[in-house]
Image (cartoon, rainbow, N blue to C red):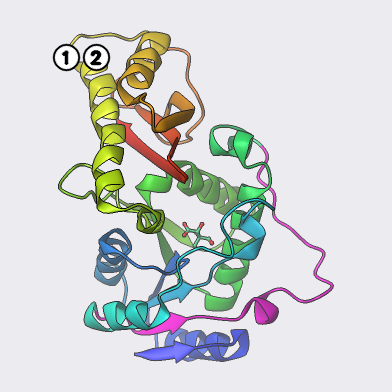
Amino acid sequence: MKIIRTPEEMHSFSKSEREAGKRISLVPTMGALHEGHLSLVDKAKSLSDVCVVSIFVNPTQFGPNEDYASYPRTFDDDVKKCEERGVDAIFAPSPESIYLPDASTKIVESSISSNLCGKSRPKHFAGVTTIVGILFNIVRPHLAVFGEKDAQQAAIIKRMVRDLFFDVEIETGEIVREPSGLALSSRNKYMDKLEREGAARIHSALLAGKRLAEEENCDNVDRIKTRVINEVSNAKTRVIYVEVVDSETSLPVQRLERGKARISIAVWYGNTRLIDNIRI
Ligand code: PAF
C-alpha cells in the first residue's frame, strides 16, 4: 500500500492507473477510521480496481469554536486498518499542500446546505464541498463512496457533482452501528463507555419515530418529530434538530411519503455533537 503525501504524487499515481485502464475509487475521510469507514472501503473495492482512501482533517469545514484542534488523529492505526482491508493507496496531504496561502476559490451549494446541520454550522458545507472538489481533481477517481450517516453531506455532494458536471459517480454506504444501536462516528471517541451507552437513545428515538410512521400509519410530520424529541430528551441531551426529510435530497418535507423519507437528527450528548438518521 502506497502512502502519498503530495497532490503532484497523487496526480501521477492516478494518471498511470488510468492509463493502465484501471477504475479508481476514492473514500474521502478525516481519519480516526472505524468499521463504518471500512465498510465504505469494502464497497469501493467491490466497484473498482484501485481503492484510494484520503485522510485529511479539513480545517475549512470546522467553525471557529469547533473541535478542529482536538479532532482525533490516529494516523498509524488508520494505516494498519487500511492495509488489512486491502486499500491500494492512502492520500494524506498537509493543509499547506492543499490550500495555497492566497487561495480565493470556494464551492458553495446553497439549497440543501442551508437546512439541518447547515443552520447551526453555517460555513461547514462550503468547506466540505470545496475540499471534496479539490480531492476529486487531485485523485481523479471514477467513483467515490460516502457514508449514509452523513446523509445531508452525501446529498450535497451529489448535487455538486450534478451541477458542476464532475465526472465522478457517487455511491453511498449504509450506517454501521454498535450493538447498542449507536451509529459509529469518529466523534464517539470523545465519550466514555457509559456515555456511549446513553447515546444509544438517539437510535432508539429514531426507531420510535419510524414505528409511529410505519406501524401506526402516522403521516403527520410534526407528530413524528415530537415523538423522536420526547424519546431522545433527557438531562444529557440537547436537541439541535429533528426533521423528516426527503431521503434523496435531505430537504425537509411537510407530508410523509413512506419509502422516500428519512428522520434526521442532531443532538449534543454532553459535550459531543452527534448526528444520525433512519429511513422510513
Ligand atoms: O465525512 C467526512 O469525513 C468529511 O466531511 C469529508 C467528506 C472527508 C470531507 O472532509
Label ID, residue 212:
2
Q: Are there few (<14), some (14-19), or many (20+) residues within 10 Å of tag 2?
A: some
- In this picture, residue 155 sits left or right of residue 208: right
Which residue is rendered at x = 36% and y = 47% of the image? 148
Which residue is rendered at x = 43% and y = 47% of the image? 150
* Residue 108 included in the magenta stretch of the image: yes
Q: Are there few (<14), some (14-19), or many (20+) residues within 10 Å of tag 1?
A: few
Give the residues drawn in magenta, as a range: 86-110
Q: Amino acid at mark 2?
A: Leu
Determine contact: label 2, label 1, CB under 8 Å.
Answer: yes
Q: Please say whether residue 50 is visible from this viewpoint.
A: no
Which residue is rendered at x = 48% and y = 41% of the image? 152
- In this picture, residue 42 sits left or right of residue 241: left
> Who is closer to the viewer here, 16 or 91?
91
* Residue 179 included in the magenta stretch of the image: no
Quarter of the picture holding the N terminus: bottom left
> Who is closer to the viewer here, 98 or 198?
198
Which residue is rendered at x = 24% and y = 14% of the image? 212
Give the main secondary structure, helix, strand or loop, of the magenta stretch.
loop
- Give the x, y percent position of residue 93: 57, 81
Name the residue beneath numbered marker 1: 215
Q: CA distance from mark 2 to mark 1?
A: 6 Å
- In this picture, residue 55 sits left or right of residue 180: right
